[in-house]
Amino acid sequence: MKHTISVLVENKPGVLARISGLFSARGFNIDSLAVGETEDPTVSRMTIVVDAKDERILEQIIKQLRKLIDTISVVDLTKREFIHRELALIKVNFKKEDKQRLLSLAHKYKAEVLETEENSAIVEICADSDRVKEFLEQLKNFGIRELMRTGRVAMAK
């Protein structure tokens, strides 16, 4: 099961390395990791997504995260109602005759065509992970040249 964990930490060097080390030491691959300052510049929020088949080990990691000196709070959002988003920038093959089809697809997914050139276009989407995945599937018909995706960011309702 995929777990979305929100961790508030002190905004100091080395904190990210210590926290990611806890996961790797237990053999968990981090599927997604997003880190950024909060409204308080001395505090950062980490949103970590992991696929945890063993709930006991995940609970141990959460307990150990809480014990780290730079950790302020740890919440497994998976057990709560939360909203999440992901941002993707996609460079696709583009021909002038495909313009309307691309614009129509972008409109359907509430994405935005940021830039068009002679043979490529850059498209942006900000949505939940499933919608981003669906959109990327549709863009494969154009030919994806380059893809940049952020990690998941999440907030409890």
Image: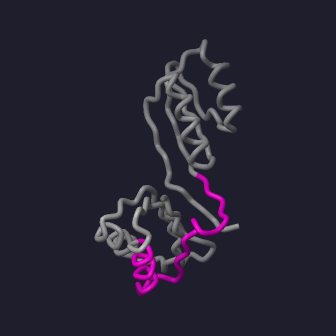
Residue at screen point 56% across, 29% down: 138
Q: Is residue 37 magenta?
A: no
Placement of 135 over or under 153, stated as above or below: above
Residue 130 rendering spot, x and y as whole percentages = 58, 45
**In the image: residue 6, left or right of residue 13:** right
**In the image: residue 35, left or right of residue 79:** left
Residue at screen point 55% across, 16% down: 95
Residue at screen point 42% across, 56% down: 31
Residue at screen point 58% across, 35% down: 135
Taking depth in this image into account, of 14 and 85 the one nearest to the observer is 85
Magenta region: which residues? 58-85
Q: Quadrant of residue 26?
A: bottom left
Taking depth in this image into account, of 4 and 106 the one nearest to the observer is 4
Residue 23 rendering spot, x and y as whole percentages = 35, 69
Q: Quadrant of the C terminus?
A: bottom right
Q: Is residue 71 magenta?
A: yes
